[in-house]
Image (spheres, rainbow, N blue to C red):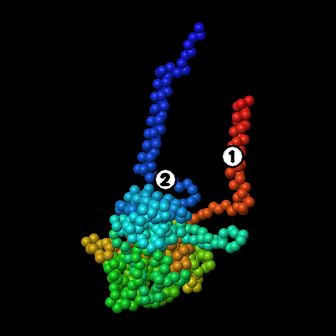
Amino acid sequence: MAPDPQPSFTPGRRWSIGFNVIVVILLVFSVVVMVNYLSREYFLRFHLTSQTRNSLSPRTLKFLESLTNQVKVTIYYSKEEPLCTTVQDLLGEYSLANSRIRVRTVDYLRDAPAAQVVKAEYKLGAAADKNLVIFDADGKVKVVDGNLLARYTLEQVPNEKEREFRRKPTEFMGEIWFTSALLDVTSPKPLKAYFLTGHNEHRIDSGDEGSGYLKFASILQQNYIQVDTLSLLGTNSVPMDCNLLIIAGPTVPLPAHELDKIEEYLKQGGRLFVLFNAFSAGRLTGLEKILARWGVEVGNGIIIDPDHTMSGSEVVVSAFSRHPLVNPLLGTGIYLVRPRPVSRLETPRAQPADAPRVEEIAGTGPRAFLTDDPARSPREFRVMVVVEKGAVKGIVTERGTTRMVVLGDSFCLANNQIEFLANRDFAGYAANWLLDRTQLLEGLGPRPISEYRLVITNQQMRVIRWLLLAGLPAIALVVGTLVWARRRY
């Protein structure tokens, strides 16, 4: 008789294999749990694609780190809208960066009961109240209209029969509006900036491309800074709710009583952003004397920098010192139009310990010269300084600590020039540094939208359709038949 076949695996071998399988499963499960735990506790994510519409800027991330409020965000959108997915993905980044931000999506077309609840909660009644992003923090609500989230251009659609155009998105503005809305609903009260009027300053309600300040005012509002105009005529003084006074390009002298009110505001710990321009060169506005007492000298000439210009009249400034206001601008530049020199006033005597600290933070190249200099002596010029004076020990000022930014050109923030180089970013940096909001001193701007389109003819579409519907199944059938035949024979 043939001997009994030996079993392939002994009982001990079977138990050993089973034990190993259980150990491997437990190890894999442990690794998965650890990875999920670490990804939750230590937020570390990478954006490897060129499409960065959904990656948050350093400014937003710093702001989210400081956010302690509970915020409810409702995306009241139709999922058929092209931007809906982008909005959801971006707000998902906000929620991942700060778990206090809770995001939900309500499709008003597909989920009518939930849409009715949202409409009742936030009093949305009109038919136009759709495609909204609603931010709610402890009952304080800010609604962002979806129509503001992108910039568009008209593009002709290829059509053999008739001319047809469509709106093509070019820039996504979501982060600008969402961070601004969060700042709005989580701040105890808005800050306020006043623009001095009555001396030919730039107007914040003007859309004039060359001189209007409408866009600058909009940037301040996006930073949750209310804007208003201020006249110091008569008995008017700088209001106590003035967190920032902006004097933008006066070209006629300020009366003595107005200068006294401005100086008193500074002594109380006020914040001042003053911008000069070429039209006031050679004539005193009165501000020069006030600034001199604070250690700032404003020159009368107009700077030409042949190494940093495009047409000769403008100066591209990219030489910055190390200072929180301009640190985010390192590697970029600001576009100035015929700027005047602004520098630290040299004094022969030693300054007291409580003297204002003046820093020169931006300048030209070494071959710049002044237009009123017959010799055109080349040298570097400073065009912007900052002034800071801390509180004196034992003395409490009414408004805090004095801060100033003095710039030799005011046209750089006009509606047209503010879009050049990093001028738009600089406008926000200057305001936020003056208001001591260091968490907002990082770049935040629109993100470009790139489209990848494949244009094919009707004939090509028919070929693709038949290839997908018939060609691929036929190839699979042929390959399967060949494999079967090979195994059969």
In the image, taking residue 243 as reference, residue 14 lies left or right, namely right
Crowdedness of circle 2 by 10 Å Cα count: few (<14), some, many (20+)? few
- Residue at 39 percent of width and 84 percent of height: 230
In the picture, which quadrant includes the N terminus? top right
- In the image, residue 386 sits, relative to residue 100, either above or below, namely below
In the picture, which quadrant includes the C terminus? top right
First in sequence: mark 2 vs mark 1: 2
- Residue at 71 percent of width and 44 percent of height: 475
Please state the horizontal and vertical placement of residue 130, each as a whole percent of the image: 47, 69
Check disc 1 and report the residue beneath it: 473
Question: Which of the numbered marks, if any, corresponds to residue 164?
Answer: none
- On the question of residue 446 being in view, the answer is no
Judged from this view, the residue extending furthest toward the top is 1
- Residue at 27 percent of width and 71 percent of height: 393
Check disc 2 and report the residue beneath it: 45
Please state the horizontal and vertical placement of residue 426, each as a whole percent of the image: 49, 72
- In the image, residue 108 sits, relative to residue 358, either above or below, namely above
- Please state which amino acid type lies under the numbered disc 1: Pro
- Residue at 42 percent of width and 62 percent of height: 113
Q: Nearer the viewer, residue 127 or 141?
A: 127
Please state the horizontal and vertical placement of residue 341, each as a whole percent of the image: 50, 79
- Please state which amino acid type lies under the numbered disc 2: Arg
Please state the horizontal and vertical placement of residue 142, each as a whole percent of the image: 41, 69
Q: Nearer the viewer, residue 400 or 80?
A: 80
Hey, which quadrant is residue 257 in on the image?
bottom left
Residues at discs 2 and 1 in contact (Cβ within 8 Å): no
Q: Nearer the viewer, residue 399 or 189?
A: 189
Q: Judging from the image, what secondary structure is the residue with disc 1 in?
A: helix
Q: Judging from the image, what secondary structure is the residue with disc 2 in?
A: loop
Hey, which quadrant is residue 244 in on the image?
bottom left
Crowdedness of circle 1 by 10 Å Cα count: few (<14), some, many (20+)? few
Q: Nearer the viewer, mark 2 or mark 1?
A: 1
